Amino acid sequence: MMKPIVELNRCPEGRGTFIGVDGKELAIFRVSGSPEVVVIDNACPHANGNLSSGEVVGRTVSCPWHQWVFNLDTGLCVDSPGARVARYPVEVRDGVIHVDLDHPPAD
């Protein structure tokens, strides 16, 4: 079930936004030049770095602690394909970002 989590206008394009909801820490990214919104787990699997504060370049985000780079389309680490972050189904309705936290993350 899709759950409303934050207003779209609170999430700037090209940067991450942190939000905690239902015991999960999430990183929200509005892809620059696109209406697309991506929601992933906020913690880098390497050392739990805060991905929402990482540098966004194109369709990737790098962890601010050790610069592991993650593909926002797949959640896979670019340099270590065995590492990944969960990516959640997202819809934007009436200016509000909704995320499905009840089902397994989308691959």
Image: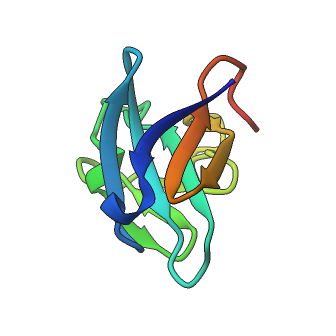
Asked if residue 68 is positioned above or below residue 98 in the image, the reply reads below
Report the residue that reaches farthest toward the front.
94
- Total residue callouts: 0
In x, y percent, where is residue 45? 44, 30
Asked if residue 39 is positioned above or below residue 37 in the image, the reply reads above
Is any part of residue 84 visible from this angle?
no
In x, y percent, where is residue 55? 33, 66
Q: Judge left or right: residue 77 versus residue 15.
A: right
Q: Nearer the viewer, residue 16 or 85?
A: 16
In the figure, residue 104 lies in which quadrant? top right
Report the residue that reaches farthest toward the bottom.
33
Split into 4 quadrants, where in the image is the N terminus?
A: top right
Give the colour scheme of this rendering: rainbow
In x, y percent, where is residue 70? 53, 53
Split into 4 quadrants, where in the image is the C terminus?
A: top right
In x, y percent, where is residue 8? 44, 59
In the figure, residue 102 lies in which quadrant? top right
Is any part of residue 1 visible from this angle?
yes
Identify the residue shown where x is 46% and y is 58%. 29
